[in-house]
């Protein structure tokens, strides 16, 4: 298991390095005149050139990337071109907001999806059809529409939750829960729809296998067969789909954080992308990639523990 985890970690680090090269190259292609943007159209060209040189934009692209990588391994992602704030510090302040949002979404998605998927896979008929219909509707609705509906109903009309704002858990745990509930539910609806269908299909497949039919023929109680044998076999593909949904939810978090006014990485991405602040954008890209790699590594290790054959693939 340790060798398998190390191989997966090595693959993840290689992916991070490759994406850093591609992202740094693509972001440098437009070659914006940052000095002109900062100093204004009336600034003398000599002063603009000096400012660009101070930012290191006059050096070759390979040299700039090498300097960035050397600093990045020391957790120094540079400074914003427009605010001179530390990118590392800005991300450290905003990352917990996004991680708390994604953690809540992942927990809700996993629990609800397995309950609905197992229920639909075991209870064929009306229950199965109802769960499938709800799943299709939830998957078809876009996240921003679900978010707006929840804001109008639960925040504006009923007043159960605040419409915008964020309370850190260190300030008030109940306040944090109230500000994070609607965003979590808004992102969980399409994710639950996708994962629950995969769980349902996997449960039906495992129930039809020979070893499960043999266990049932020996007279073992059906709930015991489901929870001790069926779920273990059905969890492997479901976890893979859940990891894929996590990547999609990161993109949806950009819209959700904007609507609810959450000071997370998603809102930060929109704010600094419109400015063309390359150091901040590069930092957001790399942090997002690291989060995705870590999540996929954890899922791979969990799948290998549930299914030892996966270690040989």
Image (cartoon, helix red, strand yellow):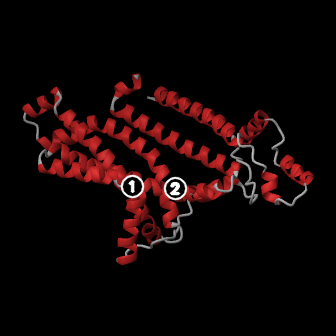
Quadrant for the N terminus, please: top left
Labels 1, 2: front one: 1
Helix, strand or loop at mark 2? helix
Mark 1 and mark 2: Cα distance apart in space? 13 Å
- Residue under pointer 2: 254
Q: Where is residue 200 shown, x and y percent of the image?
A: 23, 42
- Where in the figure is residue 136, as x and y percent of width and height? 28, 49
- Tell which of 65 and 223 is nearer to you: 65
Q: Is residue 225 left or right of residue 184?
A: left
Crowd rating for badge 2 (residues with CA inside 10 Å; few <14, some 14–19, many 20+): some
Say the numbered circle drawn on residue 6.
Answer: none
Q: Local crowd at mark 1 within 10 Å, few (<14), some, or many (≥20)?
A: some
Instruction: Indicate left or right for 81 with 23 as reference.
Output: right
Q: Position of residue 215 (x, y in %)?
A: 13, 32
* The quarter of the displayed image where residue 306 is located: top left
Which residue sits at x=22%, y=38%? 203
- Secondary structure under badge 1? loop
Residue at image location 30% in from the left, 39% down from the top: 235
Q: Nearer the viewer, residue 208 or 228?
A: 208
Residue occupied by mark 1 = 142
The image shows a total of numbered marks equal to 2
Horizontal side of residue 187 vs 133, given as left or right: right
Residue 93 pos. (x, y %)? 61, 59
Residue shown at the point (37%, 61%) measured from the top left: 146
Does the rendering let one see residue 177?
yes
Q: Is residue 260 above or below residue 199?
A: below
């Amino acid at each position: 298991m340790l060798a398998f985890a190390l191989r997966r970690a090595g693959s993840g680090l290689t992916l991070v390095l490759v994406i850093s090269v591609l992202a740094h190259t693509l972001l440098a292609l437009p070659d914006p005149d940052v000095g002109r943007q900062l100093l204004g159209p009336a600034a003398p060209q000599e002063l603009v050139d000096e400012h660009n040189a101070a930012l290191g934009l006059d050096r070759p692209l390979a040299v700039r990337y090498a300097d960035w990588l050397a600093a990045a391994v020391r957790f120094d992602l540079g400074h914003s071109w427009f605010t001179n704030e530390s990118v590392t510090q800005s991300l450290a302040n905003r990352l917990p907001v996004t991680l708390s949002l994604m953690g809540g979404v992942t927990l809700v998605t996993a629990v609800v999806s397995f309950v609905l998927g197992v229920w639909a896979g075991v209870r064929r008929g009306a229950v199965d059809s109802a769960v499938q219909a709800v799943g299709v509707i939830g998957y078809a609705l876009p996240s921003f529409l679900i978010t707006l509906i929840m804001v109008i109903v639960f925040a504006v009309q009923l007043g159960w939750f605040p419409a915008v704002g964020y309370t850190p858990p260190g300030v008030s745990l109940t306040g944090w829960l109230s500000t994070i509930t609607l965003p979590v539910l808004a992102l969980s609806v399409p994710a639950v729809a996708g994962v629950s269908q995969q769980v349902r299909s996997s449960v039906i497949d495992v129930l039809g296998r020979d070893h499960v039919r043999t266990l049932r023929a020996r007279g073992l109680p059906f709930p015991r067969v489901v929870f001790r044998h069926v779920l273990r076999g059905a969890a492997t593909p479901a976890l893979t789909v859940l990891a894929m949904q996590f990547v999609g939810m990161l993109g949806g978090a950009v819209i959700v954080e904007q609507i609810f006014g959450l000071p997370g990485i998603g809102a930060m991405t929109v704010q600094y992308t419109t400015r063309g602040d390359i150091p901040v954008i590069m930092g957001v890209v790399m942090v997002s990639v690291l989060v995705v790699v870590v999540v996929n590594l954890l899922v791979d290790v969990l799948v290998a523990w549930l299914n030892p054959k996966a270690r040989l693939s």
